[in-house]
Image (tube, coloured by chain):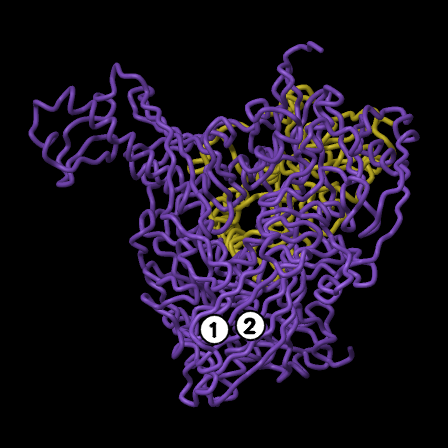
Amino acid sequence: MAQNTRTVPAGTPTNVTQKHNKGGIGESTLRPDGTLKVTGEFAYSSDMWHEDMLWGQTLRSTVAHAEIASIDISEALAMPGVYSVLTYDDLPAAMKNYGLEIQDTPVLANGRVRHHGEPVALVAADHPETARRAAAKIKIDYRELPLVTDEASALAPDAPLIHPGRDDHHSGHVPHPNIVHRQPIIRGNVEEARKRADVIVEGEYTFGMQDQAFLGPESGLAVPSEDGGVDLYVATQWLHSDLKQIAPVLGLPEEKVRMTLSGVGGAFGGREDISMQIHACLLALATNKPVKIVYNRFESFFGHVHRHPAKLYYEHGATKDGKLTHMKCKIVLDGGAYASASPAVVGNASSLSVGPYVLEDVDIEAIALYTNNPPCGAMRGFGAVQACFAYEAQMDKLAAKLGMDPVEFRQLNAMEMGTIMPTGQVVDSPAPVAELLRRVKSRPLPPERQWESAGEGADVRALPGGLSNTTHGEGVVRGVGYAVGIKNVGFSEGFDDYSTARVRLEVINGEPVAMVHTAMAEVGQGGVTVHAQIARTELGVTQVTIHPADTQVGSAGSTSASRQTYMTGGAVKNTCEAVREAVLEIGRRKNGSYHPAWATAELLLEGGKIVTDGGEVLADIADVLEGEDAIDLELEFRHRPTVAFDLKTGQGDGHVQYTFAAHRAVVEVDTELGLVKVVELATAQDVGKALNMLSVVGQIQGGTTQGLGVAIMEEIIVDPKTAKVRNPSFTDYLIPTILDTPTIPVDVLELADPNAPYGLRGMGEAPTLSSTPAVLAAIRAATGLELNKTPIRPEALTGTL
Amino acid sequence: MRVNFTVNGRQQEADDVWEGESLLYVLRERLGLPGSKNACEQGECGSCTVRLDGVPVCSCLVAAGQVEGRDVVTVEGLAEFAKQREQHGHGGACGTGGGCGSEGGVTLDAAKQWQAKPADSQTGEGVELSNIQQAFIDAGAVQCGFCTPGLLVQADALLEENSSPSDQDIREALSGNLCRCTGYEKILDAVRLAAARQGEAV
């Protein structure tokens, strides 16, 4: 079916150029896309528009576990305005599944649904409401199956198997087919070490299911092309990972699926998995028309994986002088119906379960279950968040039992450079755990009765209950709590983690200018800002153009695991260095005979010139490049290799880099109504080197706030009787507003990691870890309650539950 | 149905509007103005905030038919709206159906060809920004930017009413606008900065 060449859709990203005289690394350079974003011109994936486009709609299962006896699409197909209705039977290729690590997720349900909201059918129509109404006319006969909802029902002898006959690479070592992956870590001798303990504390902790709640809904536009392929504009965290999963299901070679990153409205892990990408392509290829899919908020809650809810069982011992003796723990993560990132989350939860403490005798086990609950996968903090919530509660319990100050107790056991992790890996760069705690503790506390300090009488907006005007200070008590956490940076356990950067240097209007082209997903973190800064520093240019991210350049890896500044930033630095070397080669060839420094000195590119490390100017870059082709290089960059954890002992140098943050929370609790006001959430973090302090502080404050959300309000509630999600909306799933969020003073340390580009330390996730346990510790301090579950709702504080 | 209303000072006609369509949908999909954002479409997040006859509203909760004959200002028109307000005094001409931006605005055809275009955020070269827009950039209040259009419209309305708001005033005024990236600190910074600059300019 030949067709005319289509016009480029509205909202297609274009080059963004930023000119800046300073703006190298270490400067708080402003975002190159800032003007676009404040004028409403920045095109997000949901803004894509094509003149003859159709709207796609997904029909999702209304039950959690069932066989599909029949699907009748006839009524939907007969509706005016409907162009296509697709089910499993219409899938074009032999490959029908996708998945990050294990391809266990059906593109459309094949005779069985395993969780509430699983995609069953697709509709394309000329108006989104037509598509929705048509989807509602599809008749599905579900025969419900028994549910698996927790550890007991998943591992029972007669438990229904979520994936019978699974043959993935974890299936051989797990003790039960409803366990996705199991990672034990055994080091030292817990039984012997326990004998040295003067005090032992045990705890059972429950972490609720958190949603990433990025504001830009899953969305994108698929445009069929003349060669039978498809151009796909989407918001994602990793274009090339998507591509690897999309192409086989479409039955197309990867080069016929051309992906471009559209504007991304936040991610936080929730865009690491495929959502609407394949569905939009299927509909576009079936109708030969551009198809746009935009989830609404309700569907978004079903359209991406969530943070794993977890049960954590911990035992710690300590001597009476406050030294930890041993730790034993079991972490049970609910992975839901499909694997997603569960295996890697298990590895993280297990290997980071001791926290940033010295512990030589440990017995650790982490598992992820297959259940009929919503699938869970990546979210900021990735397995380390759940563990931190539990081990920090344990630290407070131990300190209390020993009669010690909770901060001093932590400092006494804090890891440092040279500490050996439970995996046997030596921490070989700065680990200023005690110092971070010292910094948050030494900060002056907010004034008592702070609600009065603003003016006369009580400003109810500064009190628990806020404008509901529930108290003027009566029944309000203050609590202060501390926590610290450890997170890994980059992809671990032997994964070949690399990033690619293409850098082009040429002379335009007598001035050297650089272009940086990567496939890095800018999801809001400011990667594009940092790339321009790195190019300026390495190439001595003022003007840098950021090329849109697409699959025409090599993979940049995922915008997750706190890795992008390290990895794609590192790749940009690496390619810039090669470009610089190419400039110097040309310079030596043309000018080398005029000055001995060309051969002998270390040469840099600064301020548009080639200079010696002593500051002597040898030539203008523009002069050297005159008459030359543009220098245009594309290179890969890798961090140091890691190895898989041993499946029995958990030993192995599995992580690339560690990162640390500490928090002090100050809360005020209305003990009569159980209302909590977080007054201040002070934080300190080591970032190795802040490439852009403005962005660094913004990341820390944002990450801290997501941790606060889990502490006091955020939880996807899944009915244990039906495995159905009960609160898929912003009316019922609450995230912190500006009224819920306190002032967040930030103290940034910069202790260089000699292994990392510029000494930087990946930093996006660490603040999300310790924020939650600090708030819980503060509420415990205020109320004297034990509080072993997130989030803390009023009924947990008033005892009315 | 056909809906006639003024958007950013320009008379607009939207045809074939289905009765259930929201103002947000008409702006985004029929008028080529996708600046107002669709984060929840149920009035909880504020990302679709526009001024309707001067009043900040969630455009996702306004039925398109309700705006017949009325004035709407979106983030795309915010700079011009603020400029007119400065020149004509409180409230601006846009909010009352005057001749705001009669030369400005975009034609429907031009809007549909809309492309994200490069610009220099350091200098704002070639782009005229309102005080609050510039302050959001300068203070680092923009990360993913999805909440930004709604926050800008809301914060601009706050500063129109209250030129030197306290932190609690800012928090109260912006409490209907969710942001998931920033933790709000830099948004507070931005509004304080805009208020201070506004004060200096007087």
Residue A175 to residue A320: above or below: above
Residue A562 to residue B65: above or below: below
Q: In what element is the residue under mark 1?
A: strand
Q: Quadrant of residue A405?
A: bottom left
The residue sitting at 49% across, 82% down in the picture is A317
Q: Amino acid at mark 2?
A: Cys
**In this orientation, which residue lies closer to the viewer: A700 or A91?**
A91
Tell how many labels: 2
The residue sitting at 65% across, 70% down in the picture is A206
Location of residue A279 in the rendering, given as x and y in whole percent from the top left corner: 71, 33
**In this orientation, which residue lies closer to the viewer: A344 or A23?**
A344
Tell me, for residue A362, which label it has, or none: 1
Left or right: residue A112 versus residue A741 is right
**In this orientation, which residue lies closer to the viewer: A526 or A574?**
A574
Location of residue A160 in the rendering, given as x and y in whole percent from the top left corner: 78, 56
Circles 2 and 1: CB distance less than 8 Å?
Answer: yes
Q: Crowding at label 1, few (<14), some or many (≥20) Cα neighbours within 10 Å?
A: many
Residue A441 to residue A569: above or below: below
Left or right: residue A24 versus residue B48 is left
- Callouts 2 and 1 in the same chain: yes
Disc 2 target residue: A329
Chain that is coloured yellow in the picture: B
Q: CA distance from mark 2 to mark 1?
A: 8 Å
Q: Amino acid at mark 1?
A: Val
Q: In what element is the residue under mark 2?
A: strand
Find chain A in the image and tell me its colour: purple
Location of residue A364 in the rendering, given as x and y in whole percent from the top left corner: 52, 69
Q: Earlier in the sequence, mark 2 or mark 1?
A: 2
Q: Quadrant of residue B27?
A: top right
Question: Mark 2 — on which chain does it sit?
Answer: A
